[in-house]
Amino acid sequence: MVHSVTTRDPAELIGRIHRETNWGFGRRTRHALASVIARAYPRVIGAAREPSWLFFDLVFPILGMCSIVFLLRSRGVDEAWIGSTILATALLSFWISVVWMMGAQFHWERDSGNLLLYITAPVGLGSIALGMAIGGALGVVIRAVIITLAGVLLFGAKYQVADPLLLMLVIVAGVAAMYSLGVCLSSVFLISGREADHLGSLLNEPMQLLGGVYAPVRSMGTVGVVALGILPLAPAIDALRQVAVPQLATTGILPVGIELVILVVMTIIFGVIGRSLLSYIERVGRSGGRLLARAD
Amino acid sequence: MSESASHAAVHASDIGRVFQAKGGPVTALDSIDLRVEPGELFGVLGPNGAGKSTLIKILSTLLLPTSGAASIFGLDVVTETARVRRIMNLVAGGDFSGYGLLTVREQLAMFAQFYGLPYREGIAKVDAQLASFGLDEIRDRKISALSTGQRQKLNFARSFLNDPWILFLDEPTIGLDVSAARDVRDRVRAFQAEQPGRTVLLTTHYMAEADEMCDRIAIVNHGRILAQGTPTELKRMVQKDTLFIVGIDELPATISMDSLRALPGVLSVAERDDVTDDVSGVGTQTVRLAVGLREDGALGGVISALAAGGAHLREISKSEPTLEEVFVQLVGRGISESDIAIDGA
Ligand SMILES: Nc1ncnc2c1ncn2[C@@H]1O[C@H](COP(=O)(O)OP(=O)(O)O)[C@@H](O)[C@H]1O
Ligand SMILES: [Mg+2]
């Protein structure tokens, strides 16, 4: 009761506020980009700040990789397949982060109260999701590199990359498609609520199989072809094998160029679906009153 | 929208909100009309389940009303959400937002970006807020290592980053100790004083907090506003006149209650039954008279009359009604009682 109410002309105040809230295209674009970077930041430094996470994130994939390599060797399979397994494991670490981290992200953001702050801030959920994806992917890069190096050192895998640019394109397109799907998963998990946890474990194992981590998708017939059409992991691994392990260039289910196109198309389609899922979340959250509220 | 409505900081007309819950529809808000002027600190006071958070959610664009309309500085909360979000901020009690592994400073810097501040300006704002909340010492501490009080200060620091024209506070001091709550209230007042027109809408179920902080208060229960006004106006509702308690040793034989009642400005005189035995052993008691007056000045006449009759004055106190009494009169029970009733339901 100490301060005095309205010591200024209300019309002048309203005019000023209305001008302030009128953001032009330039300002909105700059804001969206800055928000993407701001949201990516904690994901990137997370890996650096918590070395223990890195440790656990590495131990299991590397152990899994070892067991497959030993299995392949005991069967006398061509050494080229071992190199391929290592690369697949490296790519798989992106996929695991998509299913586990990205998938649960919005759910977690809601329960921690962040989602509520994002919705009431001028930032769009699209920028948040994009920042989350880019930060997540960058955070996994170190992991993927370490896995590859470990494979090379432990098993002496040899790679021959005739076209490094193509290799980069395949990796970037594969990772982009996976994280684009990740945005969809994150939204779906939030919408489906508690079942999300089960969904996560449900997705992981079968998708590794379908994604061709253990065996080339080609050997899986029709199922493999379907996987190639839906799961980004499948064309990504198939293309990576063809580009990086020349002896296996003929084992691809489709030419690398086409797989690359598939990955780009997937990125776009999942991106569009993700965007509409995000608007759905905001719309239904505001009308229903449950989706955005903390479960307490 | 009418000219006067568009000049209000908050204007809500006939807002209703029905939730579709498992047990059937729940009416959280039922025809709320509210007008908050620019620069006001407006309080929404009510027990648990009254609909306070629902109202804040609707005004802060988190929730749609199922009927009625509301605007913030003339911007519609349903159709102009993007613009509303550029001038508002929100603190909810018990908020544990943020990323545990970020430092205090990093976390604020992240939000400054979300609020659309240019990078350098954002960092400068962050540092200014850290200083003003006394969080400088822990600026490089991880969020996960903060105490509840520190977290809530951090939430407030965050909410000031974009210099909001309207700040929504949903039970902001819940879980804070007395001194932390006082700090936070002081900062809110200072924030408003810095820039005329900054408006705060606060919900609380603490009577004293509402009484001490708010320019005006709306008392809500079961999704309806039962009364609104300044704390003084609300208290007037339960007690229209000023009431003094006058304690004397005994009522002189020469003075009758009726003669006191006949004095100018005196509305009522009644003997209170809370006569206390004198513990000092002198053998006297205190007789308490409840004297209702048209205005404070009339007390002089009563005191002189009693003194002239030979009565010895023991005590004089002004009886102030509390918001609690206002609430009891409006709702028929105390605010904490109704808490329990709702919680147990
Ligand atoms: N999302 C929801 N679904 C169903 N009922 C709700 C929901 N949110 C609030 N309510 C109900 O609406 C009423 C008002 O709730 P709320 O606004 O949270 O009250 P307050 O903040 O005053 O404690 C309560 O009865 C509560 O149970
Ligand atoms: Mg509440």
Image (cartoon, coloured by chain):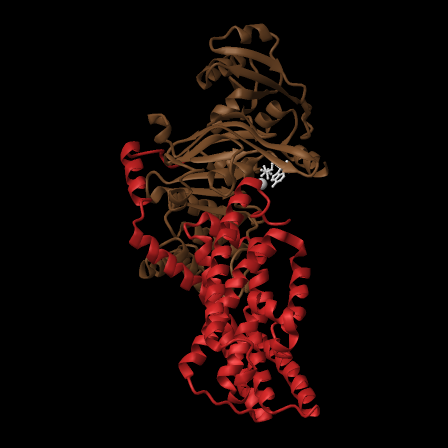
Chain colours: A red, B brown
Of the pair B129 and B287, the residue shown nearer to us: B129
Of the pair A48 and A227, the residue shown nearer to us: A227
Position of residue B307 in the picture relative to residue B40 (left or right)? right
Position of residue B149 in the picture relative to residue A59 (left or right)? left
Which residue is found at the position 48% from the left and 90% from the top? A160
Asked if residue A235 can be seen in this view, the reply is yes
* B268 over A7 or under it: above or below: above
Which residue is found at the position 49% from the left and 51% from the top? A276
The part of the image, by quadrant, that contains residue A99 is bottom right
Position of residue A7 in the picture relative to residue B175 (left or right)? left
Q: Count how many numbered circles sit on residues in the image.
A: 0
Q: Quadrant of ligand 1?
A: top right
> Residue B115: percent from the left, percent from the top?
39, 53
Residue furthest to the right:
B344
> Residue B135: percent from the left, percent from the top?
45, 59
Asked if residue B181 can be seen in this view, the reply is no
Of the pair B171 and B295, the residue shown nearer to us: B171
Position of residue A13 in the picture relative to residue A113 (left or right)? left
> Residue A254: percent from the left, percent from the top?
53, 75
* B98 over A218 or under it: above or below: above
* B293 over A273 or under it: above or below: above
Of the pair A253 and B233, the residue shown nearer to us: A253
> Residue B337: percent from the left, percent from the top?
68, 33
> Which of the image's four quarters has the N terminus of chain A?
top left
